[in-house]
Every structure is written in C-alpha cells, then in structure tokens.
Image (cartoon, rainbow, N blue to C red):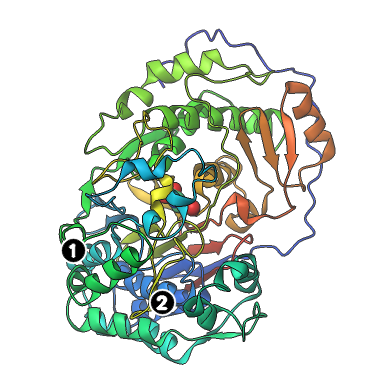
Amino acid sequence: MLWLGCASTRPKADETALPPAPIDTTFARAVSTTAQSGMVVCAHPLAASAGRKVLQSGGNAADAALAALATLSVVEPHASGLGGGGFFLYYDAAQDSFFLLDYREKSPRRVNRAQYFLPEDTLKLVQRTGGTAILVPGAAAGWRELHSRFGTKRLPELFADAIAIADTGYQISEKQAAIILEHAAEFLTDSLLSSIFLDQGLPPSEGFRIRLPELAKLLKFLSNTRLDNFYFAPVASDVMAAARTHGGSLDDRDLASYAPVSRAPLRVTYRDYEIITAAPPAAGGITLLEILKLLEAEDIQSMGLLTPEYIHEVATAIRQARTDANTWMGDPDFVQIPADTLLSDSYIEQVYNSLSSDSVPQAMLPLDSLRAFGPGNTTHLVVADSAGNVVTLTQSINYFFGSGVMVPEWQLLLNNHMADFSSDTTSVNGLRPNRRPVSSMAPTMVFKNGKPVLAFGSPGGPRIPAALVDVLLAVLEFDVPLNEAQNLPRFFPAGQNLVVETRIPEATLEALKAKGWRIVPNEHLSNYFGGVQAIQFLEDGVLVGCSDPRRDGAADGY
Ligand code: GLU
C-alpha cells in the first residue's frame, strides 16, 4: 500500500503485552465438509440437500441457489422468503465476471412519515410491527434475475423439493423451537400464526412438524407461470390486502413497479487478495472493506490471533468503519455515497493515524454507532458449482417473523424492513417514500490470482461485517482451518462497550479493560454474533464448506 512505508504518527502498542491465553473449546464445534465438484452451504440441511441434488443433476450454481432459496423459504420462514429481499453476488466463471444484484425492499410511495415519529412510540413499534413496517418485497424479482441471467433448469424442477417439503411438512430443530418460543407470546393473538407455529397453543418442542401447504401453492404457481406474477393479482392483491388490514400503505402500483437494481460490486485489494462485495445500499460490504484497509497497515500475524492487541485493533477498526457507514450510507439512487473516498489510501491513513493502539477513543466522530443490540436474523447461502461459478447471497425478512403479518392465502410472512430506516429524520438513511433502507448485508468473495479463495456471508445485522472479518483473518492471516475459524470466540464493539463471547480468556479481557474497553459478556456461543456460511476453495481444487455453530446450517457437496 502506498502509505505503508510512511512514518505513522500513531502511538505503538505496549510491547510487554501478555501472551495469548488458551481459549475454551468445550462446546458443539463446527465441522467442515469437503467436496470435489460442487457445494451448497446454507442455514438448513434440507435446503443444502435440495441445492446439492440440483448440482448433481447438472444444474449450475444459480439453479442450486434457487432450489436452496425456495426450500429455505419453507424450512426457515421466520428468517427469509418471498416476503423479503436481499443481495446476491454471482461469479460467472466462463465470463470471469462478477454480477451484483440489489433486490432490497423499497418503501411504499404513499408512506406517511408523520405516523412513524410519534413521541409516544418510544419503541418504534410503528416501524417494526404490523402493516406500517412492511416494504415492497424484492425477493421474487431477485430470484427471477438470478434465474433469467444465469439459470439453466426450469423453475418447476428447481422448486420441486421446496414444494414437497411445504406440503408434507418438516420437523423443527432445537434452535428453531427456541426461536418460536421467543416469539410465542406474539402468536397468541394471531390465530393464523399460532395454527402454524404453535403446538395446540403452546410453544412446540424440537421435532414438531410445520406444514405450509398454501406456501407450497404459491411456489407452485410462481414456478409454473413466472416469478414476476408475485407483483400482480392475485398474489399482489393478497399481499396488499394483508398489509392494509394491518395498517400499511402498500398499493398495487408499489408492487407492480418494483425493480431490482444491478450495481457494480465493490472491489478492493487486501494484501495479495481481492475482496469483492456488495455495494450500497448494503453498508456491510463497505464496512468490511474499510475494516480490512485499516488493518492492512498492521502486522496482524505477529500480534497473534485473539490476543488483546489483536482484539483491540480489530475492534477499533470495526468501530471506525461502522461510524463512517452510519454517517454516509443511504440509498445510492438518491444519496451521493463517498465510497471511493472512504476506501482511499489518504483517508485510511488519516483515520488510522487518529486511532491509538493503547486506548479506546471516548467517542468517534461524527456518528459513533452505539447500537449493540437489535436483530440479526436473515439467512445466507453460498454455492459453488463444477464449472467454477459461485453465488454468495444474503436475504431477509429482517426480524425473525418479519412484521408478524402473514398473507393468509399464501402463508407468506412479510418483512419489517421499515425498521432499517434511521429514526433520525435528518439522516441520509431517513425514512422516505420509494427508498431502499441501508442494510448490513455483505455477501462477499475473496479472490487471489484470479481464482476464488473464500465465498461467504452472514446474518447478524450490524455484526455481519465483524463476523466476516473474524473468519477472514483467521483463515487468511493465520491459516486456521475454516471450521476452527468459525469456532473462535467473537467480539463486537459498540461505542466503548465490547460485547464478547465468554470463551475469551479472563486475562485477555483484563488487558482489554486496561485499554479502556467496557467488557459486556454475552453467551459463550451466541447467535448474536452472526451465522457465517462459507466455502473455502483450496489450491488443489477441493471445496471446504462450513456453517457457523451459532445457528442451524449445513454444507452439502459431492
Ligand atoms: N435488516 C438487516 C439488514 O439488512 C438484516 C440483516 C440481519 O439482520 O442479519 O441489515
């Protein structure tokens, strides 16, 4: 890097720092799966298997991704589906080119801003629940683009597994039962949701069977006709009626005019690697790149993995990058976003030199992000096929169960992505009609010498870029096997607070406290810190897939 040789004005870390203490490894650990030809890694074994079967029957990465997405919409309906939106990055091996699609949801054109800023609504419930929380879903249009640009197989074949599973039902996992338990009280007042997700009015146990026959009909209808039919009667009318019954303002023009946008992916070098990731309105990509650029000046390897110095440097870089994202990110169709400036050598050098290796800044200007909590639901999938094509895709209905509004005719949960607009009306990400709210999603690929090294992404809301940096540094800087990289304890800065998985040793936490971090213990393995789905591409051509142990997931290859 241009400025690496320049004299840094930044104070040096304490040379007498403690050696790394051993890390607790007594928990359910992630395992890697290897494959020679193709691989699907995602949040549910049934979805991974649906995708892998498509690969094995001659489908490509786009085909397999569509089969897995349709299945995820059935087996993980609380996290993503046709009622939401997302971003995908596709590597087309034959063309040696990248394609990024933004199919983020968009606010209705008749959104009544005043109703979102009532002083008595301190919890922002209008933004988070019911019809007022719902944005125009982008998923059907996003899936259509994936299929029409890159797919080779017909949709009825690709959706067959999803439709069969929705019809006959599937047994919920322990983690899914826990998610339902957390939301069970909300279902009690909704006979539709309780009839699907509760067991005779009570939170179900692991193994309880969920059936979604009306969702099966929706998948059958769209795959037999066109995915675009989501945006027209009868589906659109039913979506609109559900939103309006619950106080929303979606209308038929909002739905009929929805269009996804192809955007240039962000591409930046980090040492010998090229990182390719999502562009705004996904802020996760640029945040990830700024973190890596700030860390590039450091000799990460000599710090040692998860030492106090390492955690301090990474956490400080995360905090700075989040501050910049908070300040500058909005819908790029309306807001000028200084992406090039934020990633330029001169800006990175200036910011790097303003940070200290020894102490935690009191506040970062202008918009320090103190948001430590908040949801991190969502789903991520990665697919690699035998022709070298790769898909990395993140999509969501935002909070688990989205707005809590289900379209009864199709058993379709609608998103609450209105909550991703800033509640500060002056913000560049302020709530306005016809806009896409900023997202933390970051579907990402890492290339070296023109070949893929890693393709990954994660749910986790604001923690997404942090989770990806943790895995990326462990794999690329420390040669840690992918599954062990997933197992390592995570941390996340919010202001001067550092939320940590409690497996980080006490001595390390004490050293971090001495630098000024306020340690906030989370669980020893918490889905708060994301759920990374990743494929690593080894030099001998072997694919290594691994799901995060913090959430459900599976890698399936052949
Ligand atoms: N609403 C979130 C976003 O777009 C979803 C990501 C997540 O919760 O994981 O950033």
For label 1, the residue is 252
**Percent from the top left, x then y, of residue 62?**
29, 67
Q: Kindly state the secondary structure of the residue where label 2 is placed.
A: helix
Q: Residues within 10 Å of mark 2 (few under 14, many from 20)?
A: many
Q: Residue at x 46, y 38 (%)?
A: 288
Viewer can see residue 453: yes
Q: Is mark 1 within 8 Å of ligand 1?
A: no
Q: Residue at x 84, y 38 (%)?
A: 506
In front: 416, or 443?
416
Characterize the local packing of mark 1: few (<14), some (14-19) or many (20 or more) Cα atoms within 10 angstroms.
Answer: some
State the image coordinates of residue 100 (x, y, percent, origin top left). 27, 50
Looking at the rendered image, the quarter that the N terminus falls into is top left
Query: Of residues 144 and 408, which is closer to you in this image?
Result: 408
Amino acid identity at mark 1:
Asp
Nearest the camera: 94 or 364? Answer: 364
Q: Which mark is residue 71?
A: 2
Q: Is residue 322 above or below residue 10?
A: below
Q: Which mark is residue 546?
A: none
| Picture quadrant where residue 339 is located | top left
Q: CA distance from mark 1 to mark 2?
A: 27 Å
Amino acid of disc 2: Thr
How far from the left and from the top, in percent, is residue 278? 34, 45
Q: Residue at x 47, y 20 (%)?
A: 366
- Vertical position of residue 498 compared to residue 211: above or below: above
